[in-house]
Amino acid sequence: MIRPKEENRAMIRVLLVDDHPVVREGIRGMLSTEPDLDIVGEAGSGPEAVTRVSSVAPDVVLMDLRMPGGDGVEATERIRAEHPGVHVLVLTTYDTDTDILRAVEAGATGYLLKDTPRAELAEAVRSAARGETVLSGRLAGKLLTRVRTSPEPGRPTLSPREVEVLRLAADGHTNAAIGRTLNISATTVKTHLMRVYEKLGVGDRTAAVSQAMRRGLLPEK
């Protein structure tokens, strides 16, 4: 029996993103019994998720990782850049350390597997809405192992999207031109560049390109 939503409790707005309708239906069924969780929309791809975030204003996005037509990592980057107040919680079947690291670097608040029990998933959504990191013990161990075994500890890393943006900047393109090439807004391009500047400890794109090449983060052509 579905319990009525509690009027006196702050509702958490949730957007479900998965390319399989049956999976979305299953997740909706699991979470619909929670009195403080409100499923406000669904999307079947990364690009659709970005669009839906703008229209339904969720607090938390439950994001699948690999989807045709645009994966969850790229969508997470765009959502976090364009809507900093929205938290993305990855829910996927993939548990490799590379996948986890990519999602975290893209700005995901947490990373869970689809076999997560209903109660644990609901609590994870609540934690994500508060901006808290959500990672199961096993996945946290994988991520920690990856960080510990990465070459050159302390070396800054750039996400795939940040490398794309910086490469186009190195070629002399404006933010608007970069945005058109990558199908993102100029504001999002600026956000990516600001993150690059912060990671590299520089103040402009020329210095960022120089530092990135010197550190091997942006190989010369």
Image: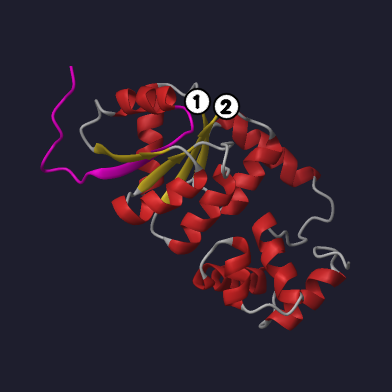
Q: Secondary structure at mark 2?
A: loop
Q: In the rendered view, does 58 fall on the left or right side of 158?
A: left
Find out whether the residues at labels 2 and 1 contact each other: C-beta distance under 8 Å: yes
| Labelled disc at residue 93 | 2
Residue 72, quarter of the rendered image = top right
Q: Secondary structure at mark 1?
A: loop
What residue is rendered at 70% in x and 40% in y? Answer: 98
Mark 2 and mark 1: span between their CA atoms?
6 Å
The percent coordinates of residue 36 (x first, y second) are 23, 37
| First in sequence: mark 2 vs mark 1 | 2
Residue 22, quarter of the rendered image = top left
Q: In the rendered view, does 2 fall on the left or right side of 81?
A: left
- Tell which residue pokes out farthest to the top in this image: 1
Q: Main secondary structure of the magenta part?
A: loop
Q: Is residue 130 above or below residue 114?
A: below
The percent coordinates of residue 3 (x first, y second) are 16, 25
Mark 1 closeness class: few <14, some 14–19, many ≥20 residues within 10 Å: some
- In this rendered view, identify the residue nearer to me: 23 or 179: 179
| Labelled disc at residue 114 | 1
- Tell which residue pokes out farthest to the right in this image: 221
What residue is rendered at 56% in x and 36% in y? Answer: 67
What residue is rendered at 50% in x and 25% in y? Answer: 114
- Quarter of the picture containing the N terminus is top left
The percent coordinates of residue 89 (x first, y second) are 47, 42
Three-letter amino acid code of the residue under disc 2: Thr
Whether residue 131 appears in this view of the structure is no
- In this rendered view, identify the residue nearer to me: 78 or 33: 78
Q: Which residues are magenta?
A: 1-20
